[in-house]
Image (cartoon, coloured by chain):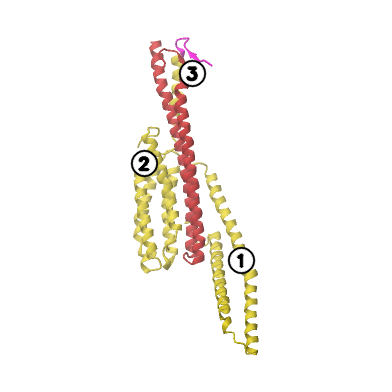
Amino acid sequence: MPNDTAVTFEALFDHVRDEAVGAFNDVRTGVMDTARTVIIHQMRQIATAVWDIIDGLAMGDYTPEGAAQLLDMARRAAATAISGATELLCTEVEAAVNRIYAALRDFLSGAINLALDAVL
Amino acid sequence: MRFILTAPRLRPSLNVAILALVLAGCSALQPATPYDPVIEKTVEKFDKAAMTFIADMQGLSRTPKGTYGENVGFYKKWKIELEHLKNRAISSEVGETCGPDDELDSVISGGFGALDAALKKGDAALVRPTEAALKPALAWARDSLEKIRLTAKANNVDLTGFAPIAERFRSLSDRTDNWQNAVNRIRGAMIAVRRQATLPEGTSFSAVKGGCTTKMLTYLSDQLSAMERFHMAQRDIGIPPRRAVVILISVPVQVILKVQERKRILSQRGVLPTP
């Protein structure tokens, strides 16, 4: 935090930059994590289930009506995975924005006090 | 570039105040519903109960105790719990949408369109060798064996030593028949699935409206209802010891728990609102 009333762009930028870079790295890690754990892993599981449904039909373990319900469940599972991935991405972005906003707010609250001191 | 807010004397406070007001407006950005420990705990309990129930049912498959009629209680209990959880999510939902619905629809229908095309190709590939090649070959082999048998009989030749060949032919013939039956089952089921003829009106998948948490919990609740209909449709087979049901219940559970876990961690770090 600067000790005089001069609030420089560099001072503001330096203070927020570290938080912004950290937040961006968190978003990047979060996005990769989301892609890996939710989209790829869950879609692979759903594909395994669809294969099992076809195999189970051939083996007589599933009735055609039962298999139709399972394929319907596979559709819904895919929709849940997409909603979950969207929610995770929004959460990561929100967390990053909140972190940068908090850094700016802390800096500016100090700057406002200094500016008010200078005015008053 | 050096940007100094020093003169006139009122400029620093004015600029800083304007910037602060703009940032205050940004604080309204809250696209995700806050972490909810009740959702996390209830879904964890459901996961444990569902996995136990499915394992028990798989052990009782093809027995009277494994049929839907004998196990209605599980569905009744958890449908109420999940419906309550869905209502809780709706009441605390911050966002009104979870990405463009058109996009979701196109991903889902695109994925299943590709699956449908793959099944049609697989269906064609299965039919060709059996009907176009194997059946004439088997007919030829059957005729040849008959001719050999008749020739041997006419010439008083003992065919005892050739019995294993005839046995192998019968085995091959049986296996081909089994294969053909399996192909017919798959083809019949796929036609039924494509036409959705076996799914009563209003019971098949349709994208729901609302924020992401509402959507996920609605899908989980609907997934349990679909599992109930599956159990019913399986008649006396019940739930067989196979992977599909476990996976299709686990996927929404894992996704919801993953989202809640991440929200919990970010809340603890102070970068997301706490419950």
Chain in red in the render: A
Residue at screen point 36% across, 49% down: B44
Which residue is identified by label 3?
A10
Q: CA distance from mark 2 to mark 3?
A: 40 Å
Residue ID at (46%, 48%): A80
In this view, B186 is above or below B29? below
User: Magenta stretch: dominant SS?
Assistant: loop
Amino acid type for the residue under numbered disc 1 = Val
Instruction: Give the residue number, with chain letter if any, for mark 1.
Output: B127
Chain letter of mark 1 equals B
Name the chain letter of the residue that bears numbered label 3: A
Q: CA distance from mark 1 to mark 3?
A: 72 Å
Give x and y (percent) for residue B13. 43, 15
Residue B250 vertical position relative to residue A68 in the rendered view, above or below: above
Q: Which residue is mark 2?
A: B36
Q: Secondary structure at mark 1?
A: helix
Q: Are the residues tagged 2 and 3 within 8 Å (C-beta)?
A: no
The nearer-to-camera label among 2 and 3 is 3
User: Quick one: label 3, few (<14), some, or many (20+) residues within 10 Å?
Assistant: some
